């Protein structure tokens, strides 16, 4: 067998596209803009859909009520108004009849430029009729290559026959630069023909046979050079399975490696410090908080490193739990680090912990991207000398120059915003913290409010043990969620006003910072001015968004928290963690643009005090039934786990195990992955395979080991892969 080793070592699919015959540096650069730099990238650039050319016909022969397509020339095009709604219409003709194409959701500049008179286009979609006029609403459109455009790619045409000839199924790719589809097809086709054959993939032959799947080479060929739809589906399934299998196998190896490591024994923090803290906090811990603390203490005391995930819905009180864990580490003679995904959140944690720290005699430092250079240098010195007990920070914490004297516990808040890479980075840093020597692995506590469906958590949090806070603090009022349409805007403002009049504060969240030329969306900056001037002139309205400087953001947040502003107009920078109990109403504009988990997080900004809170979802573009259904889920329940399960049903698991969550670097086929059963099968097969070949020493095991190394790169250490 021509070993796959060599295939992976530069000769084959890792080869840069610009060295491929017919591509070259110029074309290569344009491809790279789309993230396509290697042969492998191109192979994984799967079609977004397939067009059945046998359904193409003349416009006259298009059947109303079926899907079909036709080619024609643009006669007229332009913006149209239907009452208050805007649309864009294009009329094409092919000499047999005319066909109208309509859009309701579009970027005007772009669409105008695309459908100039005389442009030859191919349109595809569901044919409807308006009176006697045939129409396609939101058609799939391809601008047909004008002659002369075709020789962009000078490949030896001979081997390109495949999918291009004749009718039947044609793959349609996501747009690359301003290439014509035909050009993209040519590029991909020639790569498939030259490189796909012989690629085996990570799945053992026996498993492929048992599951009725194809090798990777066969799969790429069938996905890019389609013959029949059922083959295409099998091909995609096989590609996804191959990725899932290597994901599961990698995770299994990681779990095994971690079990072998030695950890710090941190048995401190039992009496005095915790008693003191107990006197400082204004509430009793919930049962659930106590229970997870028990898990944490047990882990910290053991001589194996803790790798625990603390899952708890928004507002369930994870922060205090993490602070107690930090105190245990400190009392055991070590340091603790808390990493948060945003500066706002890091700052908030810092203020809280700093506040308690004073009473406890604990020194806390904040380290973020906006910490001044000189100050940073001073902090780093203190941290290294062991004069700082808790370091709170953002990514700035894991930069190369931060050294701890003895890091005992690393806490990562809102872990879904980080990748596994960062987690292991912090861990590796800590391993080396004992006087520069590689030492024992510190304890790791990661926290998330993004409920990962139970069905998935084993995979997403591959090597972690899980504790769940499944109870909210006493006295919390349920949040009332109202899904409203644009026509109800005034009523929404009325609800906000009602809360403000009671002395509460409000969040108004927008999807964009500034007005966008391309999208007709309400944006934070414009709305801030409008709200402050026209709608709530008697209240103080602040603006917060991600493009502001760190210090500015902090100041606005601190002022809002202190009640110096009544309304905070913001982008999603407040999505995670922000805690202002006096805020009892949140309005989310263009709710249709956010994912369920994100909406749930945003809603979690209210309902933190003892007063009843309201969350208003204003949805503007919801023609689509699914969108409305999705938003209804949020209206119906505040149970994060239920929402996650619904999200899973709607989006499929691919999104959940993207790069961020799993640390699997190139989960390339995720958007086509909708089948949870496939994931379960892959996990079962990976586990079984590892049992049969624990050290991956059989020829097949060695081949697979090589692929894992390539796919996980440095995310799996050599110790793990063996
Ligand atoms: P999250 O789990 O979303 O990070 P936080 O830790 O920010 O939640 O806690 C949310 C709010 O609940 C905070 O204002 C915190 O002080 C408060 N809180 C935490 N634990 C309790 C408790 N046991 N009883 C009452 N309030 C609590
Ligand atoms: Mg939190």
Image (cartoon, rainbow, N blue to C red):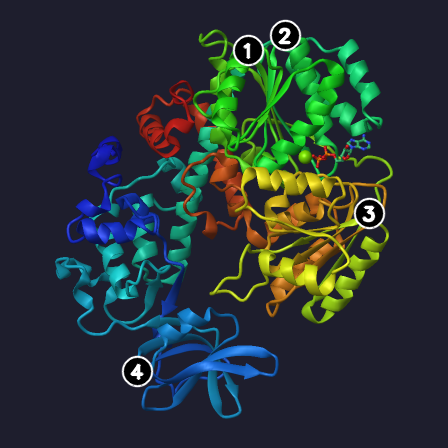
Image coordinates for residue 527, horizontal then vertical, percent? 63, 60
Q: Earlier in the sequence, mark 1 or mark 3?
A: 1
Which labelled disc corresponds to residue 333? 2
> Where is the N terminus found, in terms of image quarters?
top left
Q: Is residue 312 visible?
A: yes
> Where is the C terminus found, in terms of image quarters?
top left
Residue shown at 50%/35% (left/top)? 662
Q: Earlier in the sequence, mark 1 or mark 2?
A: 2
Q: Earlier in the sequence, mark 2 or mark 3?
A: 2
Image coordinates for residue 327, horizontal then vertical, percent? 69, 16
Disc 1 packing (10 Å; few <14; some 14–19; many ≥20):
many
User: Which mark is in front, 4 or 1?
Assistant: 1
Q: What whole-number distance in Å separates the C-alpha atoms at marks 2 and 3?
A: 42 Å
For label 4, the residue is 118
Q: Earlier in the sequence, mark 4 or mark 3?
A: 4
Ligand 1 has an atom within 8 Å of the beta carbon of the residue at disc 2 = no
> Residue pushed farthest bottom?
132
Image coordinates for residue 113, horizontal then vertical, percent? 36, 73
Which labelled disc corresponds to residue 478? 3
Q: Is residue 27 left or right of residue 489?
A: left
Q: Pointers 1 and 2 in contact (CB under 8 A)?
A: yes
Q: Pointers 4 and 2 in contact (CB under 8 A)?
A: no
């Amino acid at each position: 067998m021509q070993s796959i080793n060599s295939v992976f070592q530069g000769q084959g699919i890792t080869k840069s596209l610009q060295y491929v015959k017919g591509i070259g540096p110029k074309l290569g650069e344009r491809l790279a803009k789309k993230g396509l730099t290697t042969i492998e990238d191109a192979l994984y650039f799967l079609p977004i859909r397939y067009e059945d050319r046998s359904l193409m016909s003349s416009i006259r022969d298009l059947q109303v009520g079926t899907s079909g397509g036709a080619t024609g020339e643009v006669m007229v095009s332009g913006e149209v108004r239907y009452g208050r709604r805007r649309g864009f219409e294009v009329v094409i003709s092919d000499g047999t009849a005319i066909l109208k194409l309509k859009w309701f959701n579009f970027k005007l500049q772009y669409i105008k430029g695309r459908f100039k008179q005389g442009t030859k286009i191919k349109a595809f979609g569901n044919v409807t009729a308006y009176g006697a006029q045939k129409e396609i609403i939101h058609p799939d459109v391809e601008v047909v290559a004008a002659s002369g455009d075709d020789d962009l790619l000078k490949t030896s045409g001979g081997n390109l026959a495949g999918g291009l000839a004749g009718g039947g199924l044609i793959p349609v790719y996501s747009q690359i630069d301003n290439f014509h589809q035909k050009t993209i097809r040519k590029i991909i086709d020639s790569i498939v023909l030259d490189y796909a054959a012989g690629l085996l993939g990570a799945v053992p032959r026996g498993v492929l046979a048992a599951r009725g799947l194809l090798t990777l080479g066969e799969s790429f060929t069938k996905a890019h050079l389609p013959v029949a739809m059922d083959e295409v589906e099998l091909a995609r399934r096989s590609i996804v399975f191959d990725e899932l299998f290597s994901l599961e196998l990698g995770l299994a190896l990681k779990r095994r490696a971690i079990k072998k490591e030695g950890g710090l024994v941190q048995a401190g923090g039992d009496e005095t410090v915790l008693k003191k803290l107990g006197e400082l906090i204004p509430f009793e811990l919930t049962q659930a908080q106590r229970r997870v603390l028990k898990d944490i203490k047990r882990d910290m005391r053991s001589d194996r490193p803790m790798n625990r995930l603390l899952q708890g819905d928004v507002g369930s009180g994870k922060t205090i739990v993490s602070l107690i864990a930090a105190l245990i580490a400190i009392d055991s003679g070590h340091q603790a680090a808390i990493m948060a995904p945003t500066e706002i959140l890091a700052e908030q944690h810092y203020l809280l912990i700093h506040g308690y720290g004073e009473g406890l005699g604990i020194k806390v430092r904040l380290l973020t991207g906006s910490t001044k250079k000189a100050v940073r240098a001073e902090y780093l010195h203190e941290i290294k000398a062991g004069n700082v007990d808790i370091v709170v920070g953002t990514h700035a914490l894991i930069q190369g120059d931060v050294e701890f004297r003895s890091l005992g516990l690393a806490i990562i808040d809102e872990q879904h915003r980080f990748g596994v890479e960062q987690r292991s980075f912090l861990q590796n840093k800590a391993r080396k913290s004992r006087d520069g020597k590689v030492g024992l692995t510190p304890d790791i506590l990661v926290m998330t409010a993004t409920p990962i469906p139970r069905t998935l958590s084993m995979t997403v949090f591959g090597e972690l043990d899980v504790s769940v806070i499944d109870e909210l603090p006493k006295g919390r009022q349920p949040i009332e969620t109202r899904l409203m349409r644009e026509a109800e805007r005034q009523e929404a403002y009325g609800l906000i006003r009602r809360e403000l009049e009671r002395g509460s504060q409000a969040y108004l969240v927008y999807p964009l910072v500034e007005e966008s030329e391309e999208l007709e969306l309400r944006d934070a900056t414009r709305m801030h001015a409008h709200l402050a001037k026209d709608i709530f002139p008697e209240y103080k309205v602040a603006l917060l968004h991600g493009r502001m400087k760190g210090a500015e953001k902090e100041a606005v947040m601190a002022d809002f928290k202190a009640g110096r502003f009544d309304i905070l107009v913001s982008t999603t920078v407040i999505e995670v963690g922000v805690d202002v109990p006096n805020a009892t109403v949140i309005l989310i504009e263009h709710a249709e643009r956010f994912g369920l988990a994100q909406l749930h997080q945003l809603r979690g900004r209210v309902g933190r005090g003892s007063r009843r809170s309201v969350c208003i979802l204003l949805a503007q573009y919801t023609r689509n039934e699914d969108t409305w259904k999705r938003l209804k889920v949020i209206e119906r329940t505040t149970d994060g786990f239920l929402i996650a399960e619904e999200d899973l049903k709607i989006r499929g698991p691919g999104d959940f195990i993207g790069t961020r969550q799993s640390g699997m670097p190139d989960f390339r086929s995720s958007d086509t992955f909708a089948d949870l059963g496939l994931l379960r099968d892959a996990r079962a097969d990976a586990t079984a395979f590892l049992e049969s070949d624990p050290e991956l020493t059989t020829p097949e095991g060695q081949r697979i080991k090589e692929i894992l190394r390539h796919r996980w790169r440095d995310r799996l250490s050599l110790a793990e892969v063996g």
